[in-house]
Image (cartoon, helix red, strand yellow):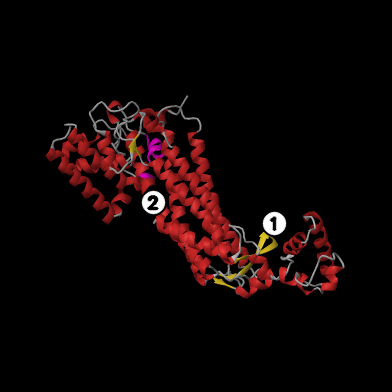
Amino acid sequence: MGNPKQSRRLTRRGPSLPRHLWGGRFQESAAPEFSRLNNSFPFDHRLLPFDIEGSVAYSKALQRAGVLNRKEAAAIRRALQSIELNCSNRPRLIRDALAKYEDVHSFVEAKLIEQVGEKGKKIHTGRSRNDQVALDLRLYLRHHCRHLCRKLVFLMETLTAHAQRDLMTILPGYTHLQRGQPVLLAHYWMAYFEMFSRDWERMKTTLGHINVMPLGSGALAGSGFPIDRRFLAKELGFQSITRNSLDAVSDRDFAAEFLFNGSLLMMHLSRLAEDLIIFSTTEFDFIELSDAVTSGSSLMPQKKNPDALELIRAKAARVYGNLVQMLVILKALPLSYNKDLQEDKECIFDTVETLDMVLEAIPLVLRTLKVKTQKMKQAAESGFLNATECADYLVRRGLPFRAAHETVGKVILYALQRGLPLEKLSLREFKLYSPLFGPDIFDAIHLKRCIESKSLQGGTATIHVKRAIEDARRYIARIQ
């Protein structure tokens, strides 16, 4: 048996707050415990400008359908625009209302009725919160996807400028975090350009999937009023309309796709952050990060910590978690709309805000870092990064690659025992391991020659890196 006092408290008629759009069938007010669980206004207030944008367009559709006359529709539009302006200019209006309203839709409708009276109650004719929130979410994501795409373009511009600047700088290239072969630093920057260009392409593709208009789907079965959906789509800048009302109100594929794109983008940003963290260590000492993006130690006066980059690296996990949350919410939902979908928003808002913040920070890190060119070159000159070119030299003289690989391995072991790089060995010492070595071996294994020998398209040879930079500039000009 339950607690009788608690039961009386739950069934006692109380004040009408929070304000709902669905109270007629109910005889008691919602319990405070339920309202706390149910209310989404504390986070979905972010949708307010998009809810108003949708309602302005819907008022026009209702006028065309004969539900509103011209004077009513005009008054409603003026009031909606006034609500948006007031909330934009006075953020406290939202803060003070967070505990009073169930969601952004009930807030906007209540404020509308306050301004225009009974005619404001007509705005929801033929519309459900189910298709309304589907619209708001698409408008929100469309806006922010476009904004994030612009920030990605700026990041790509920054990387391209760095590549042009560092076209003559040589960097050790790594596999397994061990020095492998020398590359141009410009080639390194352009590798990340490729990653972020793919991120941009994915975001643009997802924009097309977002840009489908769901309004007019009602709660699940469509609208019983002659709402011109194609007119609405044109008013709101959508490319097309949804084809199935059941799917339209419950579809969040576009949101999951956005979160996946955000996760891949954060993975690329995290990899770049990790590289720069490593390169800034005393052990590598390839770059110095600006004071503007680093912090010190509360105990150790000498420290300069790469906090901005470490936080970018960590925030990737946050975005991954948002993607998993969305997929788990959706994985077993029956058609059509379920209240579970209220939980889709916070992970979307958090991902948008995280990506926005990180895409502001990473170009600043890049623009303000100092490249230690001589340190990079010295590192590239040690560690036998020219060993592959030494083997290729023997291959060009007729030795099968596997035999050449083994021969050069023995030469390196000999050089290691004597504490010498390959280029400091004498020709006589080379010939101890193969008569195919000639005087031109020293030119073949010179650091610059190692770079320029990678002459296939996509390699680190200067000519191809220059072309990659030119191609990148044309690509940026095309997508801006």
State left or right for residue 415 relative to residue 471: right
Residue 33 belongs to the span the image colors magenta: yes
- For the point 75% across and 71% down, the residue is 440
Residue 229 belongs to the span the image colors magenta: no
| Residue at disc 2, secondary structure | helix
**Quarter-wise, where is residue 417 in the image?**
bottom right
Find residue 406 and report its horizontal and vertical position in percent: 82, 58
In the image, residue 368 sits, relative to residue 475, either above or below, namely below
| Furthest residue in direction top, as rendered | 1
Q: Is residue 350 visible?
A: no
Question: What amino acid is at disc 1?
Answer: His
State left or right for residue 259 relative to residue 13: right
Question: What amino acid is at disc 2?
Answer: Arg
Earlier sequence position, callout 1 versus callout 2: 2
Location of the C terminus (image quadrant): bottom left
Alpha-carbon neighbours of circle 2 within 10 Å: few (<14), some, or many (≥20)? some
Is residue 123 or residue 414 the one in the foreground? 414
Is residue 216 or residue 445 the one in the foreground? 445
| Residue at disc 1, secondary structure | loop
Which residue is disc 2 drawn over? 146
- Segment tinted magenta in the rendering: 31-44
Find residue 101 and report its horizontal and vertical position in percent: 31, 41
- For the point 37% across and 44% down, the residue is 44
In the image, residue 178 sits, relative to residue 206, either above or below, namely below
**Quarter-wise, where is residue 405 in the image?**
bottom right
Which residue is disc 1 drawn over? 176
Is most of the magenta stretch helix, strand or loop? Answer: helix
Q: Is residue 53 visible?
A: yes
Alpha-carbon neighbours of circle 1 within 10 Å: few (<14), some, or many (≥20)? few
- For the point 28% across and 41% down, the residue is 54
